[in-house]
């Protein structure tokens, strides 16, 4: 029996322009009619997820910041927040500066997102991020997550350069082709799903998860029904029980047939 659908946003539920198609919104509504809620599990902040969830009909909870935050959309409240301490965040930044000259950094603390000049190679629809001189000046009480990129280096190359030295401090997640994210040890989309399942009293074997990037690998390994989309990173195909169509073709909507077939069975 399927009791919950968890979906990544960018590259999965959303198209390349960051929009939710009518077909995907209809699919979320049909799942709700079956008694199955759909929630987001994303690298995005609660601020961004609130808007998308309201448009798409997602909820009642959301997994944000790659699992660092579980958020109650109905009450607009944080249910759990796994914070990188200020001391650890400062050390991560020092290591990145030393090991990757020219790296550009960004950081998030719940609703607040800060990015150094040049962090985004192109504008992100609906995203208005204040530029800062240096992330070191904005870590305050700590960070929900830290992000690093450097022009000309792939995410894999960055992880290879930084992994050994930073592994004792933080977990490293790859969520795109040219940046890596740092989180408190043990934080992932899988840890976020475990917290959601605890709150909603649902076993992970009754959960569908669908994603497209390597930061989705942990949740696909955890749930009873792992799915991906045709545009996904190749590493996900080996884990997926089924491959849905491309995200630009409303691939998520095909999940309704997947769920209905198992409900009938």
Image (cartoon, helix red, strand yellow):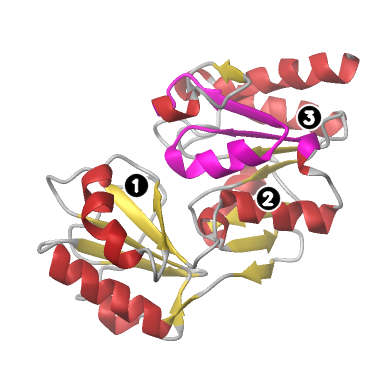
Q: Which mark is residue 27?
A: none
Who's the residue at 86% across and 30% down the image?
33
Who's the residue at 55% across and 44% down the image?
218
71 horizontally vs 30: left or right: left
Observer-nearest of 238 and 18? 238
Nearer the N terminus, badge 3 or badge 1?
3
Q: Is residue 221 magenta?
A: yes
- Let me know if residue 65 appears in the view: yes
Question: Dot 2: what SS?
Answer: helix
Observer-nearest of 23 and 67? 67
Asked if disc 3 and disc 2 are in contact, CB closer than 8 Å, the reply is: no
| Magenta span of residues | 205-233
Who's the residue at 53% across and 48% down the image?
42
Nearer the N terminus, badge 1 or badge 2?
1
Question: Mark 1 or mark 2, which is nearer to you?
Answer: 2
Q: Which mark is residue 193?
A: 2
Horizontal and vertical percent position of residue 84: 46, 74
């Amino acid at each position: 029996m399927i009791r919950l659908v968890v979906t990544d946003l960018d590259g999965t539920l959303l198209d390349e322009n960051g929009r939710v198609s009518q077909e995907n919104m209809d699919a979320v509504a049909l799942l709700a009619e079956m008694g199955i809620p759909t929630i987001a599990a994303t690298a995005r902040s609660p601020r961004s997820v609130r808007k998308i969830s309201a448009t798409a009909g997602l909820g009642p909870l959301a997994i944000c910041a790659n699992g660092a935050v579980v958020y109650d959309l109905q009450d607009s409240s944080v249910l759990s927040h796994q914070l990188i301490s200020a001391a650890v965040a400062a050390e991560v930044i020092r290591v990145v500066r030393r090991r990757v000259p020219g790296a550009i950094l960004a950081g998030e603390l719940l609703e607040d997102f800060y990015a150094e000049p040049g962090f985004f190679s192109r504008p992100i629809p609906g995203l208005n991020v204040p530029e800062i001189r240096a992330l070191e000046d904005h870590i305050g009480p700590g960070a929900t997550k830290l992000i690093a990129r450097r022009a000309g280096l792939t995410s894999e190359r960055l992880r290879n350069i930084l992994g050994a030295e930073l592994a004792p401090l933080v977990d490293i997640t790859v969520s795109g082709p040219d940046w890596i994210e740092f989180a408190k040890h043990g934080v992932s989309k899988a840890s976020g799903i475990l917290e959601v399942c605890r709150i909603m009293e649902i076993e992970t074997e009754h959960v569908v998860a669908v994603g497209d990037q390597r930061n989705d690998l942990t949740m696909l390994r955890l749930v009873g029904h792992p799915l991906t989309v045709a545009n996904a990173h190749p590493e996900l195909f080996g884990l997926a029980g089924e491959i849905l169509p491309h995200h630009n073709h409303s691939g998520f909507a095909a999940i309704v047939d997947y769920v209905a077939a198992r409900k009938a069975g």
